Amino acid sequence: MGTIVISEFLSVDGVSDDPAGVEGFERGGWTFALDSAGQRVRLRGDEGEELLLAENRDAAALLMGRRTYEFFASFWPRQEGRALADIINTMPKYVVSSTLEDAEWNNSRVLSGELTEEVGRLKCEIDGEILVPGSAQLVQALIEHGLADELRLMVHPVMVGSGKRLFGELSDKRPLRLVRTRVVGDGVVVLTYEPIRDAGQGGGA
């Protein structure tokens, strides 16, 4: 049985928009800082890089919304030879979209049906973690329908001030249990939560 793991970069004020600064958002690139020589360095540091590498290496598949899929498909094949790129390029990838007809990126498949049915079927087909990067609209839908099994939030010590937020409105409260915390790099906090699906809580699946 597969588990849906949402893995996201966040600012302290909840922005998830363009963390690497390669998507055109005017305040993008907030996961980086300038060192004493004026060079950009990742706030998550080497330890955070190893954490991301292990997370993707251990995952059974990626699940994305259309926009994230299209960006990944245009970016990662051009990074061939990097350890993380080689993992992502070869692993199974699923894109949730009602408009995308053909997913041409290696080892990709379009899920065009009703979300709960498609994700439920995927969780039955895949044994292991199904990692969800980016994909804010999909993330909100997965949380709303009680389909997310774990949230891993890599919170960066910066307030971006504008941009798309990861979390939107929900039909009810969604209580979470904090299961792990870890600090990497220059004050980046990795928070891991599991949904509490007790009787009487709305939104469970």
Image (cartoon, rainbow, N blue to C red):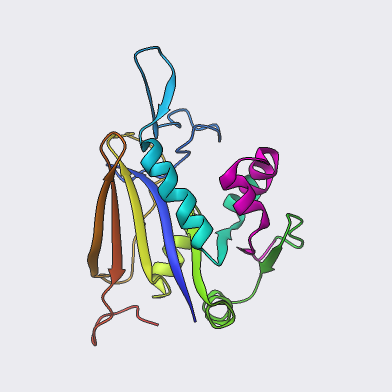
Q: Residue at 66% of width from left, 52% of height from top?
A: 89
Q: Position of residue 29 (x, y in %)?
A: 45, 31
Residue interval drawn in magenta:
72-99
Left or right of residue 155: residue 27: right
Which residue is at the front of the view, 29 or 53?
53
**Residue 96 in view of the camera:** no
Left or right of residue 66: residue 143: left
Q: Residue at 39% of width from left, 68% of height from top?
A: 143
The quadrant in which residue 34 appears is top left
Left or right of residue 186: residue 104: right
Which residue is at the front of the view, 37 or 135?
37
Whether residue 168 is in magenta: the answer is: no
| Residue 23 in the image: above or below residue 155 | above
| Residue 80 in the image: above or below residue 190 | above
Q: Position of residue 205 (x, y in %)?
A: 40, 82
Q: Position of residue 186 (x, y in %)?
A: 28, 33
**Residue 75 in view of the camera:** yes
